[in-house]
Every structure is written in C-alpha cells, then in structure tokens.
Amino acid sequence: MDPALLRERELFKKRAHALPTIEKKVKESSNASSATSSKDASKPKSRPSSSAGPRLDATNYKTMTGSSQYRFGVLAKIVKHMRTRHQEGDDHPLSLEDILDETNQLDIGNSVKNWLQNEALRNNPKIEVTPEGEFVFKAVYKLRDGKSLIKLLRHQDLKGIGGVLLDDVQESLPHCEKVLKARANEIITITRPIDKKKVLFYNDRTCNFFVDEEFQKLWRGAAVDAMDDAKIEEYLEKQGIRSMQDQGPKKPLVPKRKKNPIKKKTFKRPRDNEHLADVLETYEEQSLGASANHTAGSKS
C-alpha cells in the first residue's frame, strides 16, 4: 500500500478518537432518566393539599340547587302540571306552596322559591297571576265547554279569520276529546298540507247546496295554478264574463274634516290728528246759516 495513504488513515483515527461521540451522551441521559424514574416509583405519592378545594361531582350536577338547569327543570315541571290540571277541569288558582306540594318539590331551596315567586312564574307566557298573588294556567283561548268552542269557531268564520289549530283547542278546552265527539256535526277538521297539523272550522249548514256534477267537472278541470287574480279576471273579460265586483271587505271611509272658514281680521283705522282734538272747530252751524241766507236772498 501507498505509505501516504497509511499516514492519512492513522491521522484520521487519531482525530476520530479525540472527538466526543453523541451515542455516549444519549446512553448516559437515558440511564439518568431511568434512575430518576425508579427513584420516583419507590417514593410514595403525595396526596393533593386541601387548599385545592372540593371537587364537583359530575353525577349530581342536575340536582344542584344553584344551577340554572335545575331551576328551569323545576319550572318546566310546574308548567306541565298546571297544563294537565287545566285540561282535566281544575282551573282554580294555586299558591306557590300548593303547586310545589302537588308536584312533590317541597325540598327546593329558598333562592329557587324566590326566583319562582318573583320572576319565573310571573314572566312565563303560560302562567297567569291573580290579584291575590296566586297562579293559574293561561291557555291560548278561554274555553269552558262545547258552546264556547262553537262560538269561537263561528266568530272566526264570520270575520273571515280562518280556522283554529287543534293543538290550541286541546290545550285550552277541558275534556277536549269528549267535546269534539259530541260536536262532530258542527265542526269540520282539515289537515294542513304544510306541516300536517289539523285545523278546526265551523260547519255552516246554510252554505250547503247541491252543485251539478257537470259544473263540478268543469271546475276541477280548470287549471289555474300558474295564473294570478289579474290574469283570471282578464281571461273572463275576454270571454264576455264580468268578474264580481265589490265583494271583498270594504274599507271604512274616513269622513273628511270640515275646514273652518277663515275669519277676516278687521283693523280699526286710527283717527287723524288726535293730538289736535281740542283745537279743531266745526263749521257746520255757520255753513247752514250761510246757505239759509243765500236761499232767502234768491227768493226775494
């Protein structure tokens, strides 16, 4: 071998031995960490200090008296109970203590009671407060029996307002199912296609009349889906059929206010030469005497 290459090889080995290696440091650090971990494992674990405070039990968060979820749970139970007792015919007002007794919630705190008495029940849209400070369920409609229901439906029909939702009637009318069965001939039930809710209408028997089948076929065969009222009226006029006029609800005419006549202001003319009122003299008597003498001389 070339002696120059051998010298370079020996010099490279010397430099490599002189430099520190990374592998040794990694091994030393790993050994140190294992030693410290073994020491920590041998020591007993210290307990947390009492200054950290008590832990919250996640299983009892629903029953905590200070939580808003607990408060609104109590309120929801009260509103549901007031609705059911109204639907059963018990519409007499109750005090807060009676309500809590009937709902088995007498173990609530004073803060929740004050919140129910002064804020929650008074501001709830489904609860009405009497002058005596008691509470009663506030329904959508004030219905007592079948007569009041038919009166409501007839009023809706005469005013052209429309029907009444079955859900509102069930909430407002005590023993609703019995009343609807007894008044089935006077009520028409229609399912709304938008949300599948049932709507009650008054069955006006005076509007029942017979229509020939030929007219029914013509009526059902006329497609007016893409036409508005203006186009339908224009089409009828072209066919020589005049549409009905003045059949809708008329707006009340507001009487015109009569304008009060403007009074002309009269101004008094000031007298001239008022400061010479004592100095001026009248010559009426002298003029009358002169005229009399003149007439006498002319006659002579």
Image (cartoon, helix red, strand yellow):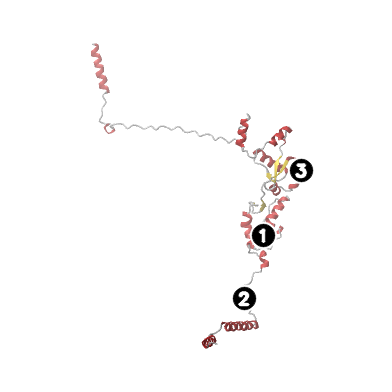
- Residue carrying label 3: 182
The answer to whether 279 appears left or right of 157 in the picture is left
Tell me the quarter of the image containing the C terminus. Answer: top left
Q: Is residue 206 visible?
A: no
Q: Is residue 78 visible?
A: yes
Please tell me whether mark 1 sits on a helix, a strand or a loop. helix
Q: Position of residue 257 (x, y in %)?
A: 50, 34
- Residue carrying label 1: 73
Q: Are marks 2 and 3 in contact (CB under 8 Å)?
A: no
- Residue at position x 62%, y 35% from top? 232
- Quadrant of the rendered image containing residue 234: top right
Q: Position of residue 62 (x, y in %)?
A: 67, 64
Q: Are marks 3 and 1 in contact (CB under 8 Å)?
A: no
In-front residue for pair 287/196: 196
Vertical arrangement, residue 104 with respect to residue 151, above or below: below
The CA span between labels 3 and 1 is 37 Å
The CA span between labels 2 and 1 is 33 Å
Residue reaching furthest to the front: 1
- Quadrant of the rendered image containing residue 54: bottom right
Q: How many residues crowd around disc 2 within 10 Å: few (fewer than 14), some, or many (20 or more)?
A: few
Q: Which mark is residue 276?
A: none
Vertical arrangement, residue 253 with respect to residue 79, above or below: above
Identified by mark 1, the residue type is Gly
The answer to whether 16 appears left or right of 208 in the picture is left
